Amino acid sequence: MIQGMLGAFRELDAAVDAIEALKKDRTGEITVYTPTPRHELEHAVHPPVSPVRKFTLAGGLFGAIAGYWMAIWCSEYWPLVVGGKAISTWIPYTVFSFELMVLIGGLSTVAGLFICAGIPRLTMTVGYDGRFSHGEYGVWVQCAPEKLKDAEAILRRCGAVEVHGAQ
C-alpha cells in the first residue's frame, strides 16, 4: 500500500523550497504535478536521464544495418550489371540506409516514449488532483508511515495551501 503526503502550492517558489527541504531531509520519493513545465522544478527534482535515447540508438543502428542489407540483398538477388561495375557497393546504398535509419529510429523513439512513460495509463496516479492542471503545483512525497508527520511539517512550513495524506 502506498502512503504519502500531498501538498498543494499556489506559488512556484514555495513548491521548489518544499522539494529541496524534502530532499534534504530524505523523506521519500517525490513526485511533482505542475500545469506547465518549469525549469525551476526540474532543477529541484534532479530527474534521472531518460532511457528513451537508448531506444533511438538501437532503432537507428538497426535501420542503418537493415538498409544496407536490403539494398545489397536486392542487388545480389536481381543483378543488374552495368559497364562491368561491381554489383554490390556501399556508396550508392548509403542514401537508402540513411532513410531507413531515420524512419526506424524515429518509430523506436515513439515506442520507447510510450514504454518508459507507461502510456496508456489505465489507473489514476496517486496524489493527482485536477487543480494541478489549472495553475497550482502539487508535491507528492511517498514515504514510510513513521515519516508522514515530518513530511507534513515540511510541506506546511514551506507554505502549502493544503496538506493531506493519501493511500
Image (cartoon, rainbow, N blue to C red):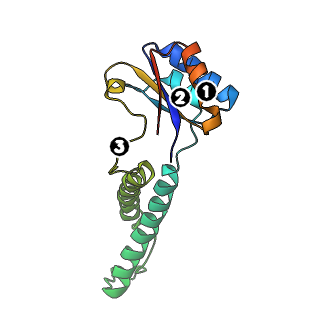
Q: Is residue 125 left or right of residue 80?
A: right
In contact (CB < 8 Å): disc 3 and disc 2: no
> Element under label 2?
helix
Foreground pick, 52 / 35: 35
**As shown in the figure, which amino acid type bears the numbered disc 1?**
Lys
Residue 42: image tag = 2
**As shown in the figure, which amino acid type bears the numbered disc 3?**
Met
Q: Going 45% across and 12% down the picture, which residue do you hit?
A: 11
Residue at image mark 1: 149
Residue at image mark 3: 124
Q: Residues within 10 Å of mark 1 (few under 14, many from 20)?
A: few
How many numbered discs sit on the rendered protein?
Answer: 3
> Element under label 3?
loop
Residue 156 on image: x %, y %:
55, 16
Q: Is residue 140 visible?
A: no
Nearer mark to the viewer, of 1 and 3: 1
Q: Residues within 10 Å of mark 2 (few under 14, many from 20)?
A: few
Task: Tell me which corner region of the image, top left, top right, bottom left or bottom right, holds residue 84.
Answer: bottom left
Q: CA distance from mark 3 to mark 2?
A: 23 Å
Q: Going 58% across and 17% down the picture, which residue do you hit?
A: 17
Q: Is residue 3 left or right of residue 80?
A: right
In contact (CB < 8 Å): disc 1 and disc 3: no
If you read the primary sequence from the N terminus, does the residue marked by circle 2 or circle 1 appear first? Answer: 2
Q: Is residue 136 visible?
A: yes
